[in-house]
Image: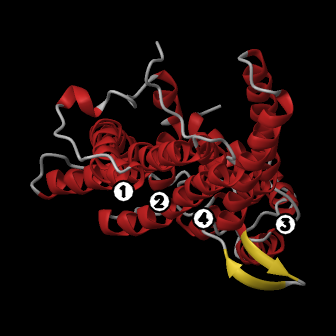
Amino acid sequence: MKITSVAKYIDQPLIINKISKVSPILLLGGALGLCVNNSLNNKKEGEPFNSSLYKNTTILSLVCGASLLASKGLKFKDKRIFGGLIDIEAKKDILAKQKKVIKEFVENSDLSGTKLYDILQNAKHRELSLKETDYVYTLLKRNSNAKKLLDTLFGKKENMTSSEIFSEIGRLSLLGLVPVAAGVGAGCLVDSSSNKAFNNCNRLKEGFYQYFANIFLCNVGAGAALFGLEGLKKINIIKELTPVKKFSAMLLGIIMMGVLGGSFIANYISKKIIDPLILKKDAQRLTLGGIYDERKPEGLDMAMHIDDIATAGVLSGLKWIEPMLPIFYMFSGYRAGLGYRNSGHTK
């Protein structure tokens, strides 16, 4: 079976709808596991378990709640209060479209008694299986009359330009900002220690770090890289912008602007603006080494850039990844809530 058929199977609007429904369960399950694990680890390091559990539960609850509201919006008695940043089509609407398009295709084709006819009748009520997807797509992909049918069953690929992608970047960056802001606010809310001002300063600095280094500038880097790729196409250095080329260019942009530039900018803001405002420190002259003396990129930060890879996938047209983004952004919100700093840690 070809990889194209697997991709088409996952791209079915009904499959994306299912992923959207299961993503909140995965988000809350991941938060629960993270909460219990870190509370037990903190107990080993001398922090009372109940205190740690309360802190972790509060931070993760507010981060997850804010993420779900931002992604799905809010309804009350079937009335939409506000819309979400991730728009997933309702199952009944998807099935209604599929029934209409299948009816049109069958009426204009001689399919009576064929395997294709039986499969299309199934598609009026449910998603196609992987084998059914492979059969239908392989049989009809070169049939010009079946384009509307295939676009409806397996999703229409949007060939977004850099300008359209920058619009998408704004939406996805806001989706990442919400859990980070919620994490900072939740961490400040539960902190009753004598070092509250210092801890809250660290939370704000970590919030800037997570947002600039792990979310916003990574998204901007992806868009800028695609803009450059389009420029190369205009002067005929590149003949065709394939999804693989787009995805590769966006990953390079993420690394250059987000991973490298984002951490530098976030640390610079922390030392030049946040410390003087909150801790009343004098703004210091900074060397390159001094920028990273309390927050430098580490292994887990690199692993957390899976959310940027997922974002690049969304911008490349892999819409099934989009409902999973709040799960990835949860870790950034949680670290911001803790005010994580790696000064003095050996990694």
Which residue position holds label 4?
151
Q: Residue at x 27, y 44 (%)?
A: 268
**Marks 4 and 2, Cα distance to the nearest angstrom?**
28 Å
Q: Residue at x 74, y 84 (%)?
A: 81
The secondary structure type at the circle numbered 3 is loop
Q: Is residue 148 left or right of residue 125?
A: left
Q: Residues within 10 Å of mark 4 (few under 14, many from 20)?
A: some
Q: Which residue is at the front of the view, 254 or 111?
A: 254
Q: Is residue 139 left or right of residue 239?
A: right
Counting residues from the start of the chain, the first of labels 1 and 2 encountered is: 2
Mark linked to residue 124: 3
Q: Using the rendered image of the protein, determine whether residue 182 is visible from the camera's viewpoint.
A: yes
The secondary structure type at the circle numbered 2 is helix
| Foreground: disc 3 or disc 2 | 2
What x and y, as percent, mark residue 115?
Answer: 82, 51
The secondary structure type at the circle numbered 4 is helix
